[in-house]
Image: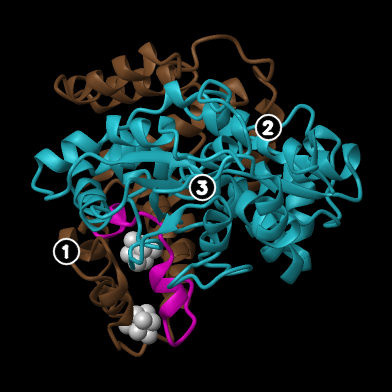
Chain colours: A cyan, B brown
């Protein structure tokens, strides 16, 4: 299994722990990654309110590079906003040849062009459908018994293009988490919006969304995410959300591959657990308890 | 700030024609709306909006352009795609919200025009660096917003991230890499 890899800007800074744990876990699962050379920002969630052409041209540049440098491989993207931006090019340009030509005209400024041979895949999609829970289970060396996780999917991983799961009641993380020995909280907030970039522009509205999610996760030891924006909103603004009226209590928030890594034998340092902003002592206690049995 | 090139705003004459075309395009996006209210019921941010998404579409189709542009509704869209997914007419509602943000940013009538600055600053940062640099981005954003209290809101988080070594301070190998692409897109979008 080989993929071209698009980390995206946040995985180089605020979400280094997501980048490193993804790379390590995929390596342990026998997945080969080739980082796209010279990749640039896809515009995140800021580009669409600024320019409709740039919304497609920026991610198309990376797709063109992937086509040229890592042909015959799907592009694996861990960040949901980056994933959607690239997928949108695949979808919209695939359905509209004029638009595809317009995007290629923009790319000609760099001597690039995109023909559309690269498929865009989210990290969760690859883990769920290509690797599969069974193979994950086989790779587990330390079952994480006694932990309950609230799987949080957010928006853009399944909306508006629900390619591998139900966007209203997503469930693809459940078998992956169970393969690690983790209990899964039955909740209906997994696909709820965390406010995304409203946290920068309309803080109060975003805080209300974050508190509702944290409240609903009260029965879990941790929330598990697959997007740096969700992760940041849920961990960095947690205290503020709770203070601003949420009933929730502090809850740990980890990236899915961080948790997987711990079950696959990586240490807390290996998955950069020290970089997380919300990790409770209760969780650390449970992770370090002897009953988290060696297989 | 010199590098504030015309990434988003064009000369006035071009703008009026372009705005009329953009407006017509947005109206077309929601033309088939049957006012069922599914979008409003699905929107997690509706409680904070001054008009619900459903009423906004109605106002748009009635030609109440000033009222629409003065509304804060589209600035409160977090692009969660719930409405787009559920609209029984299959309308591209999240794209319509983004198109309204673009229109309002170029128009100046929007009560909340300042809110577009975050996106503009973000994209200027991308144009210059190739990849986002958060510290520089936030600095420009604070300067543009001219709100002395705003940086304080972000200081605790900034310090937290800095302590964790999570802020991107160093150089980027992609510096200036996106200049030609941005220039080309700007040229293409300025064509009549
Ligand atoms: S869900 Fe669609 S049809 Fe119904 S009110 Fe909203 S835009 Fe109109
Ligand atoms: S995409 Fe925007 S308008 Fe639609 S439901 Fe989400 S926040 Fe509301």
Quadrant observed for ligand 1 in the rendered image: bottom left
Height in image: B165 above or below B131?
A: above
| Residue B90 seen in render | yes
Q: Which portion, as a residue range, is magenta?
A: B73-92
In front: mark 3 or mark 2?
2
Disc 2 secondary structure class: helix
| N-term-proximal mark, 3 vs 2 | 2
Q: Nearer the viewer, residue A229 or B40?
A: A229
Q: Nearer the viewer, residue A19 or A109?
A: A19
What residue does disc 1 label?
B47
* Residue position marked by numbered label 3 in the rendering: A226
Can I make out residue A154 in this image?
no
Q: Chain of mark 1?
A: B
Does label 2 lie on the same chain as label 3?
yes
* Picture residue at 22% right of the left edge, 39% below the top: A250
Few, some or many residues within 10 Å of mark 3 (<14, 14–19, 20+): many
Looking at the rendered structure, which numbered label has been put on residue A63?
A: none
Residue A93 percent coordinates (x, y): 73, 62
Under circle 1, the secondary element is helix
Real-space Cα separation, disc 1 to disc 3, in angstroms? 27 Å
**Which quadrant of the figure has residue B66?**
bottom left
Residue in view at x 16 percent, y 19 percent:
B148
Query: Where does residue B89 sit, x and y in percent of width and height?
Result: 46, 86
Q: Is residue A35 magenta?
A: no
Q: Any atom of ligand 2 within 8 Å of the CB at mark 3?
A: no
Q: Chain of mark 3?
A: A
**Residue A24 badge:** 2
């Amino acid at each position: 299994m080989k993929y071209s890899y698009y980390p995206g800007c946040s995985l180089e800074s605020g979400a280094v722990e997501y980048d490193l744990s993804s790379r390590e876990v995929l390596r342990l699962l026998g997945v080969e990654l080739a980082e796209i050379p010279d990749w640039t920002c896809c515009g995140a969630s800021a580009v669409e309110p600024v320019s409709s052409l740039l919304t497609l041209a920026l991610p198309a540049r990376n797709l063109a590079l992937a086509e040229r440098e890592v042909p015959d491989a799907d592009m694996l993207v861990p960040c949901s906003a980056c994933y959607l931006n690239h997928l949108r090019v695949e979808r919209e340009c695939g359905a509209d040849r004029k638009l595809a030509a317009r995007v290629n005209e923009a790319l000609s400024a760099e001597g690039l062009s995109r023909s559309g041979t690269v498929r865009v895949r989210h990290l969760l999609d690859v883990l769920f459908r290509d690797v599969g829970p069974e193979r994950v289970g086989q790779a587990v060396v330390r079952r994480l018994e006694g932990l309950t996780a609230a799987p949080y999917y957010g928006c853009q991983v399944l909306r508006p293009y629900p390619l591998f799961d139900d966007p209203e009641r997503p469930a693809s993380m459940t078998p992956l988490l169970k393969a690690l020995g983790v209990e899964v909280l039955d909740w209906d907030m997994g696909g709820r919006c965390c406010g995304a970039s409203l946290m920068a522009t309309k803080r109060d509205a975003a805080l209300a969304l974050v508190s509702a999610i944290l409240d609903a996760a009260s029965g879990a030891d941790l929330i598990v995410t697959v997007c740096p924006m969700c992760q940041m909103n849920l961990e960095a603004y947690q205290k503020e959300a709770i203070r601003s009226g949420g009933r929730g209590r502090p809850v740990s928030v980890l990236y899915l591959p961080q948790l997987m890594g711990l079950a696959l034998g990586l240490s807390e340092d290996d998955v950069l657990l020290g970089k997380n902003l919300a990790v409770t002592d209760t969780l650390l206690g449970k992770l370090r308890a002897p009953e988290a049995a060696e297989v | 700030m010199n590098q504030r090139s015309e990434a988003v705003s064009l000369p006035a004459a071009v703008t009026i024609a372009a705005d009329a075309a953009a407006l017509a395009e947005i109206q077309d996006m929601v033309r088939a709306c049957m006012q069922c209210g599914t979008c409003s019921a699905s929107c997690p941010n509706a409680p904070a909006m001054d008009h619900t998404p459903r009423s906004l579409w109605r106002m748009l189709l009635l030609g109440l352009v000033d009222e629409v542009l003065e509304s804060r509704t589209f600035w409160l869209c977090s692009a969660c795609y719930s409405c787009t997914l559920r609209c029984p007419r299959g309308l591209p509602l999240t794209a319509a919200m983004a198109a309204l943000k673009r229109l309002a940013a170029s128009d100046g009538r929007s009560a909340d025009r300042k809110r577009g600055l975050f996106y503009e600053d973000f994209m200027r940062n991308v144009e210059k660096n190739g990849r986002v640099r958060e510290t520089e981005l936030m600095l420009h954003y604070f300067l543009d917003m001219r709100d002395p209290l705003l940086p304080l809101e972000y200081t605790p988080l900034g310090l937290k991230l800095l302590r964790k070594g999570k802020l991107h301070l160093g150089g980027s190998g992609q510096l200036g890499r996106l200049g030609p692409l941005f220039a080309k897109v700007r040229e293409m979008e300025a064509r009549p």
